[in-house]
Image (cartoon, coloured by chain):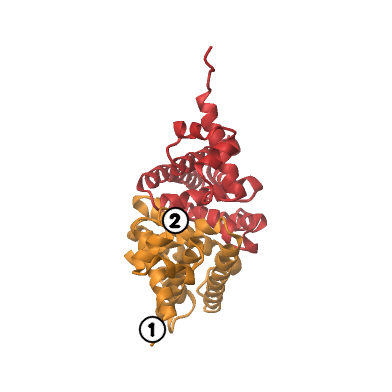
Chain colours: A orange, B red
Amino acid sequence: MPKIVDHDQRRRDLVLATRRIIVRQGLSGATMRDIAAEAGFANGVIKTYFGAKSDLLAATYLDVFEATNRRVEESTAGLRGMAALRAFVGEVLPVTEETHEEARVVLSYLAEVAQNPDHARTTAVTMELWEGWIVAWLSEAREDGSLRAEVDVAREADVLLTYLLGAQTMAIVGGGRFDFAGFRAQLDYGLGRLETRAPGA
Amino acid sequence: MPKIVDHDQRRRDLVLATRRIIVRQGLSGATMRDIAAEAGFANGVIKTYFGAKSDLLAATYLDVFEATNRRVEESTAGLRGMAALRAFVGEVLPVTEETHEEARVVLSYLAEVAQNPDHARTTAVTMELWEGWIVAWLSEAREDGSLRAEVDVAREADVLLTYLLGAQTMAIVGGGRFDFAGFRAQLDYGLGRLETRAPGA
């Protein structure tokens, strides 16, 4: 009887192996053979699923993106406006061990993207999804009267998205002030500056 | 008579060759031999100056950083406070062909840094230099009465630095809205939100 192979599971095993290698040692010195070994597969298997390291890296990035989005979905459930935006930013900023690992995957991937226009388009699509969410939450905040008059929703969404992408990098290279506590303080400060002052505050 | 070799010039030729390769095709597929050839040197020469691709990449990043700082020095000469900060941000944001090329070098380098703690420390030092400038200009702006009361100088410097690093990435992956005009509009909007309203505005 032929062995039944769960292709989705194998693909997933290879993505998780890639992630572990990025976090442990970086991908630049790792070969496809190393990644297959990390996943517990023979070297030949990997080519069935991924043609090149850059494809594996893109799949690992998308895996991180989807994991983030699942956390965002949970955190923002039942929320709207500024409360939803605050929950979203809290899931994306590298303020936990998990999101810090994710930042390393994102950074490795972005460097690859800089060289590969196809992957740049994939990333633009993921960025547009987040931009859409940010615009929707800021628009709700405006309806709720909780957004300062001078905040321009579309422009603010561009600025915030750019900041969030920068945070992925600063978590790695920014030094001591860009630790979990530092980013949380930036989050409170930055979002606080969008909001109308609460009565009596 | 022995040939007199200008070592600084050779080092510089290799850095410029690395930059051209990053902009043209990306560094990941290029060998040390390719870089030597691009600079017009025999393969053996390169090892005298740089032990590994990552060292060349770090030198190329520092070259971009210094070029940016020379432009900043010119643009901010005789300025203080918000005017100096605006000039600085205008030189760092990828709003010209030159700064867009620089963004690709920075992005390639940052991915390398994610894997190499020594390089991460180098980057932290460059970031601290900029942070110091931003804090000084914002403090002048406060003295000049041109900073809104709710702006926290230290926190704002962290947020702005993170945004500027994110802009390097968004220029590459962000899609249509993150073009020269888009970043200029973000700059006007973001810095405008720090300032007290001009009388009569």
The C terminus of chain B is located in which quarter? bottom right
Q: Please report the residue visible at 33 percent of the width from the left and 69 percent of the height from the top.
A: A40
Same chain assignment for discs 2 and 1: yes
| Residue at the farthest bottom position | A1
Chain of the residue under label 2: A
Q: Please report the residue visible at 57 percent of the width from the left and 55 percent of the height from the top.
A: A115
Q: Mark 1 points at which residue?
A: A3
Residue A87 is labelled as none
Q: Which of A104 and A11 is in front in this view?
A: A11
Q: Mark 2 points at which residue?
A: A169
| Disc 2 to disc 1: CB gap under 8 Å | no
Q: Please report the residue visible at 61 percent of the width from the left and 53 percent of the height from the top.
A: B198
Task: Residue A198: give x, y in percent of width and height.
Answer: 43, 72
Residue B107: in sight, yes or no? yes
Label 1 crowding class (10 Å Cα cut-off): few <14, some 14-19, many 20+? few
Task: Residue A189: give x, y in percent of width and height.
Answer: 42, 61
Q: Please tell me in which quadrant of the rendered image residue B129 appears.
A: top left
**Count of number-bearing discs:** 2
Upstream in sequence: badge 2 or badge 1: 1
- The image shows residue B119, relative to residue A133, as above or below, that is above
- The image shows residue B161, relative to residue A196, as above or below, that is above
| Amino acid type, mark 1 | Lys
Mark 2 or mark 1, whichever is nearer to me: 1
Task: Residue B83: give x, y in percent of width and height.
Answer: 58, 44
